[in-house]
Amino acid sequence: MSAQQGGQRRNDKGRERNRGGTRSFSSSAPAARKRRADPARLVAFEVLRAVSSDDAYANLVLPARLRRYNLGARDAGFATELTYGALRGQGLYDAVLSRCVDRPLKRLDAPVLDALRLGAHQLLAMRVPNHAALDETVALTRAEIGAGASGLVNAVLRKVSARSLEEWTQELTASVADDTARAAIAHSHPEWIVRALRQGLAAHGRGVDEIEQLLAADNAPPVVNLVALPGLGDTGGILEHGGTAGTLAPDSVLYDGGDPSRLEPVRSGTVRVQDAGSQLVARALAEAPLTGEDSRWLDLCAGPGGKAALLGALAAQRGARLEANEVAPHRATLVENALAAVPETAWSVVAGDGRRYGQQDAKFDRIMLDAPCSGLGALRRRPESRWRKTPDDIPELTGLQTDLLDAAVAALRPGGVLAYVTCSPHPAETTAVVLDALARHPKLTALDAEAALDAVALEPTGSGADVPGRRGAPVPGARTAQLWPHVHATDAMFMALFTLEP
């Protein structure tokens, strides 16, 4: 019989090459799948590798990768959802994968684990058919890691696909009695962060039973918030092309039309990407009543420049001048770039340790102290940070916050206004810092931050909590403000306002 007889073909070693008819493969035949990585999934994989191996931030790496591969809007959206979803769900997906791998996850090569996380997210949380999630992830593995790893990835992900996300979550939490531990697994947060957020809810006047809603909001992809710089920007064109007017902050737009850097007003810097919570605290400081002169403003920790740009534009309208300080020279350059659209007569940028203002004679009328913090209020925007932070970070941060707040008080003139802001609801970084400052500085008086916030918001925020005195009784007229992702659809931004008595 010839090699071609019966529709069969054999290669030069006598092995059968085609059994006739149209060749097809099932999801259980990894060697026969496509060998090139899908560009959108490749982008997500490269971002996860940068996060894992270089401690990079996804929100900085992803836009560059999207531009490098020139992805269209649909593919860019897929890559974005896959990247951030895999990072947010890492804790839960690793728990699932640990049930499907025959060795501890730490013994897997890091690129293989990243590929498995991407596959798990597609299978469990995206509208991707199982066969497509399997085939594409195996192809990605073969192309970027090697053929040897592709068989492992195929076998593991087939086990993952045997249950839904709900079924996996039920299995993983069935024997967990502790509420915090169970919530940490189900919502993919470290346990210490769940505890800290629960304490934050209580400290800021909300019920601890909201913790499930808060954790779920942390895992929901945030809509891009834009703001038009007062007197400079216009959102009309963006509203005509799919944007929606913001309901909380003035001159803001919610935009889900893809990469906002493609918008001309964003490229020019007159419209900026900025969370509505950040917009509100900057406006609240600018509009808070004060007595006397109102010409010298200070942004003590200005990098990367979002609040500085908004404050600078407001200062320009009122004939004031903003001094924007940033400790790191490269971040000071980012602040300069953020302020580029604002008239240069309204601002200056300086680089240096903000604590030095405590030893200088210069006094300011309005001071923004957006202090370095844990960032627990922005986990939805920086999903990888939840896996990097530890409880040990908090004492060092609160020490720095205390020092910077002391410097800000020293730089505030009597009758001026100081805003202490953190993107964290952790009590150690918010109410504890405020109470300690009031105890250290007898002439420092807390103001009603909620009233100041509501005065500039488009609708009441209900964000306030009374500041307790040294014996636990509220300080008259003193309330802090705390925004929440699950209530306000913003980052969990905290603000306290102070003035200094003569």
Image: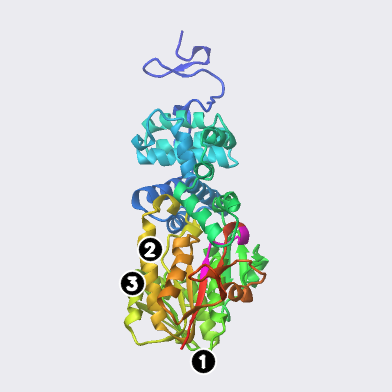
Secondary structure of the residue carrying tag 3 is: helix
In this rendering, the count of numbered labels is 3
Alpha carbon separation for disc pair 3 and 1:
34 Å
Secondary structure of the residue carrying tag 2 is: helix
How far across and how far down the image is residue 24, in percent?
54, 25
Amino acid type of the residue tagged 3 in the rendering: Pro
Q: Give the farthest residue toward the bottom.
A: 292
Amino acid type of the residue tagged 1 in the rendering: Gly
Residue receiving disc 1: 292
Q: Earlier in the sequence, mark 3 or mark 1?
A: 1
Colour mapping:
rainbow
- At x 50%, y 69%, the residue is 471
The residue closer to the viewer here, 307 or 290, is 290
Residue receiving disc 3: 329
Q: Is residue 134 above or below residue 219?
A: above
Q: Earlier in the sequence, mark 2 or mark 1?
A: 1
Q: Is residue 437 above or below residue 129?
A: below
Q: Is residue 1 above or below residue 318?
A: above
Alpha carbon separation for disc pair 2 and 1:
34 Å
Locate residue 475: give its quadrant.
Answer: bottom right
For the record, the magenta segment spans 487-495
The residue closer to the viewer here, 98 or 242, is 98
User: What's the mark number on residue 397?
Assistant: 2
Q: Give the farthest residue toward the top.
A: 1
